Image (cartoon, rainbow, N blue to C red):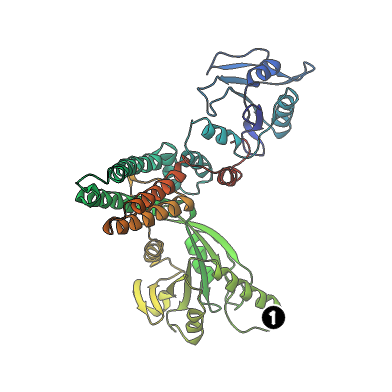
Amino acid sequence: MSNDTIAAIATPPGRGGVGIVRISGPNAPAIARALAGELPPPRHARYGPIRDRSGNLLDQGLTLFFPAPHSYTGEDVVEFQVHGGPVLLDLVLAEALAQGARLAEPGEFTRRAFLNDKLDLAQAEAVADLIEASTESAARAAVASLSGALSQAVNALHEALVELRCYVEGAIDFADEEIDFLTEEAVGARLDDLESRLRDLRRRARQGTLLQEGLKVVILGRPNAGKSSLLNRLAGRETAIVTHIPGTTRDLVRERIEVRGMPVHVLDTAGLRESGDPVEQEGIRRAWAALAEADHCLLVVDDSAGPGEDEAQVVERLPEGVGLTVVANKIDRSGRPPGPFQSPLGPGVRLSALTGEGLEALHERLAEVAGLEPIAGEGTFLARRRHLQALEAAGAALARARQQWRHGAGELLAEELRAAHTALAAITGEFDHEDLLDQIFSRFCIGK
């Protein structure tokens, strides 16, 4: 497949001032000559006519040529930059395909960059993460990953693991010597150092995962407790309809907010109560279904009344792993001060969705339950859940390695060190599997 020449529109669907058709592969220069008349000097833009096979003018635009290996994919790459109309872009792409290119698959340009050693796997994933970043913090962290921050940290652990593996393997090979190298404290000290560095990397990776995936929060409560008002206050705009009539919200209302640079996906739900209205009953059913997929629940109560039996039943029905914050709303009426407090049902925050007083305390609470830490500057990089799982697997292997070292089982110690190395190598793609690559790059947009 790497011998094919691929082409795709590299700009988003729709109309714009500029649109780009990207071509990569051995036939890219010939296609550029066929459409633009001549090939521009490497990394120089040439402005001129772009024509179809019959010589008809398609547009006046820019042609750029990036010869291998100094290109994004490591292959010969040509880009046509023309006016960004979808019909025009389709015509230019059709001409490229007619000249021998084939339509690129999702993520195929970046996959070729990975296969040609222009990027490692963590950097390749950061390309998609940067495109999909929903907050400024996530975008900056994705740039750090694309620049190699995560890869450099992982590679440093690789090198330390290789050194320890070499030492252990050597000790096993010379087991007949009078000195038992495996019993030396140097092995324990190296294990201590590896585990310490791995814990720090896992902590930073968890922060990166939060910046990418965020927190899923469901707002529950009785009718007229102020759930929709809270959603509107969190979103900073009128997202949900607010009235004094109980049961106004009957379906899920979704909104994405940002807390300390972390995306928080908030769902407002129908008020929980007994109802004979089939539409409202369906809304309540959807509320419970949404809670099953959430990370955290905001249980809204009227601060003047406090939680009652209905709220206690909600807490009893919370799915395992879903956290709880009791939001005591309407302090503008109760007169109580805003901020955190301890409710009989669990940790809570007092606020007024009407005035916004106490909202900052709720932001702090959400950051706390998510585990978000103030890791700033170059220490922040974006990580995916699979990266975190690989780091956890490496940590478990090192813990087992320590046990084998204490028992003097040299061969088993070496095997656990190899398992830790393999887990880390999966992050950067040093040891990759075709099905893993298919899964990763199939989620990219076409043209990237």
Relative depth, front residue between 300 and 352: 300
- In the figure, residue 16 lies in which quadrant? top right
Q: Against 112, is 352 above or below?
A: below
The quadrant of the rendering that contains the C terminus is top right
The reply to whether residue 63 is in sight is yes
What residue is drawn where x is 22% and y is 52%?
Answer: 183
Q: Against 314, is 211 above or below?
A: above
Q: Against 351, is 214 above or below?
A: above
Q: Which residue corresponds to mark 1? A: 277
- In the figure, residue 248 lies in which quadrant? bottom right
What residue is drawn where x is 33% and y is 39%?
Answer: 159
Residue 315 x %, y %: 48, 79
Q: Residue furthest front?
A: 176
The residue type indicated by label 1 comes to Asp
The count of marks equals 1
Q: Is residue 90 left or right of residue 353?
A: right
Residue 123 x %, y %: 47, 39
Relative depth, front residue between 318 and 26: 26
- In the figure, residue 254 lies in which quadrant? bottom right
Residue 21 x %, y %: 64, 29
What residue is drawn where x is 66% and y is 27%?
Answer: 4
The reply to whether residue 139 is in sight is no
- Callout 1 crowding tier (Cα within 10 Å): few <14, some 14–19, many ≥20: few
Residue 343 x %, y %: 38, 79
- Which element carries disc 1, helix, strand or loop? loop
Q: Is residue 427 left or right of residue 182?
A: right
